[in-house]
Image (cartoon, grey):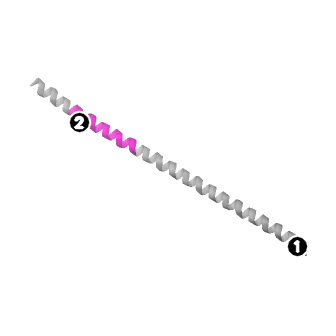
Protein backbone atom coordinates (compact mmCIF):
# COMPACT_ATOMS: atom_id res chain seq x y z
CA UNK A 1 0.00 0.00 0.00
CA UNK A 2 2.84 2.37 0.90
CA UNK A 3 4.50 1.74 -2.51
CA UNK A 4 1.23 2.48 -4.33
CA UNK A 5 0.84 5.78 -2.45
CA UNK A 6 4.46 6.75 -3.19
CA UNK A 7 4.10 5.78 -6.84
CA UNK A 8 0.86 7.76 -7.11
CA UNK A 9 2.48 10.78 -5.45
CA UNK A 10 5.44 10.50 -7.81
CA UNK A 11 3.19 10.34 -10.86
CA UNK A 12 1.12 13.29 -9.66
CA UNK A 13 4.17 15.40 -8.87
CA UNK A 14 5.77 14.49 -12.21
CA UNK A 15 2.57 15.47 -14.01
CA UNK A 16 2.34 18.75 -12.12
CA UNK A 17 6.01 19.54 -12.74
CA UNK A 18 5.61 18.68 -16.40
CA UNK A 19 2.53 20.92 -16.72
CA UNK A 20 4.36 23.75 -14.93
CA UNK A 21 7.37 23.36 -17.23
CA UNK A 22 5.11 23.44 -20.30
CA UNK A 23 3.35 26.56 -19.02
CA UNK A 24 6.69 28.28 -18.34
CA UNK A 25 8.01 27.24 -21.75
CA UNK A 26 4.91 28.64 -23.47
CA UNK A 27 5.25 31.84 -21.46
CA UNK A 28 8.94 32.18 -22.39
CA UNK A 29 8.17 31.51 -26.07
CA UNK A 30 5.33 34.05 -26.03
CA UNK A 31 7.62 36.62 -24.40
CA UNK A 32 10.37 35.93 -26.94
CA UNK A 33 7.86 36.22 -29.78
CA UNK A 34 6.56 39.52 -28.41
CA UNK A 35 10.12 40.85 -28.05
CA UNK A 36 11.00 39.73 -31.58
CA UNK A 37 7.89 41.44 -32.97
CA UNK A 38 8.74 44.59 -31.01
CA UNK A 39 12.33 44.56 -32.31
CA UNK A 40 11.12 44.01 -35.88
CA UNK A 41 8.56 46.81 -35.54
CA UNK A 42 11.24 49.13 -34.14
CA UNK A 43 13.64 48.23 -36.95
CA UNK A 44 10.88 48.81 -39.51
CA UNK A 45 10.05 52.20 -38.01
CA UNK A 46 13.74 53.17 -37.99
CA UNK A 47 14.14 52.05 -41.61
CA UNK A 48 11.08 54.07 -42.65
CA UNK A 49 12.42 57.09 -40.75
CA UNK A 50 15.84 56.75 -42.41
CA UNK A 51 14.23 56.38 -45.84
CA UNK A 52 12.00 59.41 -45.21
CA UNK A 53 15.01 61.45 -44.06
CA UNK A 54 16.99 60.39 -47.13
CA UNK A 55 14.05 61.34 -49.36
CA UNK A 56 13.80 64.78 -47.74
CA UNK A 57 17.55 65.31 -48.10
CA UNK A 58 17.44 64.23 -51.74
CA UNK A 59 14.56 66.62 -52.46
CA UNK A 60 16.42 69.41 -50.68
CA UNK A 61 19.58 68.72 -52.70
CA UNK A 62 17.58 68.62 -55.93
CA UNK A 63 15.79 71.86 -55.05
CA UNK A 64 19.12 73.53 -54.21
CA UNK A 65 20.63 72.30 -57.48
CA UNK A 66 17.58 73.58 -59.36
CA UNK A 67 17.89 77.01 -57.72
CA UNK A 68 21.62 77.15 -58.51
CA UNK A 69 20.95 76.17 -62.12
CA UNK A 70 18.24 78.84 -62.43
CA UNK A 71 20.57 81.38 -60.87
CA UNK A 72 23.38 80.48 -63.28
CA UNK A 73 20.99 80.63 -66.23
CA UNK A 74 19.62 84.00 -65.09
CA UNK A 75 23.15 85.33 -64.67
CA UNK A 76 24.05 84.07 -68.15
CA UNK A 77 21.05 85.87 -69.65
Asked which quadrant contains residue 22, the reply is top left
Upstream in sequence: badge 2 or badge 1: 2
Check residue 59 in the rendering and tell me which mark sits there, or answer none: none
Task: Say which element carries label 1.
Answer: helix
Residue 57 vs 8, above or below: the answer is below
**Is 14 one of the magenta-colored residues?**
yes
Q: What stretch is highlighted in magenta?
A: 12-29
**Quadrant of the frame with the N terminus:** top left
Residue 5 placement (x, y as % from top left): 14, 27
**Quadrant of the frame with the C terminus:** bottom right
Mark pair 2, 1: CA separation: 87 Å
The residue tagged 1 is 74
**In the picture provided, is 29 more to the left or to the right than 58?**
left
Q: Residue at x 31, y 37 (%)?
A: 21
The residue tagged 2 is 15
Q: Which residue is drawn at 63% across and 58% down?
A: 51
Q: Residue at x 81, y 68 (%)?
A: 67
Could you classify mark 1 by the number of other residues whose Cα lies within 10 Å: few (under 14), some (14-19), or many (20 or more)? few
Q: Which residue lies furthest to the left in this view?
A: 1
Residue 13 placement (x, y as % from top left): 23, 31
Q: Which residue lies furthest to the bottom in this view?
A: 77
Single out the mark in the foreground, 2 or 1.
1
Q: Residue furthest top?
A: 2
Asked which quadrant contains residue 74, the reply is bottom right
Total numbered badges shown on the rendered structure: 2
Residue 29 vs 57, above or below: the answer is above
**In the picture provided, is 33 more to the left or to the right than 39?**
left
**In the picture provided, is 59 more to the left or to the right than 76?**
left
Task: Say which element carries label 2.
Answer: helix
Overall secondary structure of the magenta section:
helix
Q: Residue at x 20, y 33 (%)?
A: 12
Amino acid sequence: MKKIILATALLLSTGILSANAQTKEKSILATADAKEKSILATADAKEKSILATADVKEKSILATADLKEKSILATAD
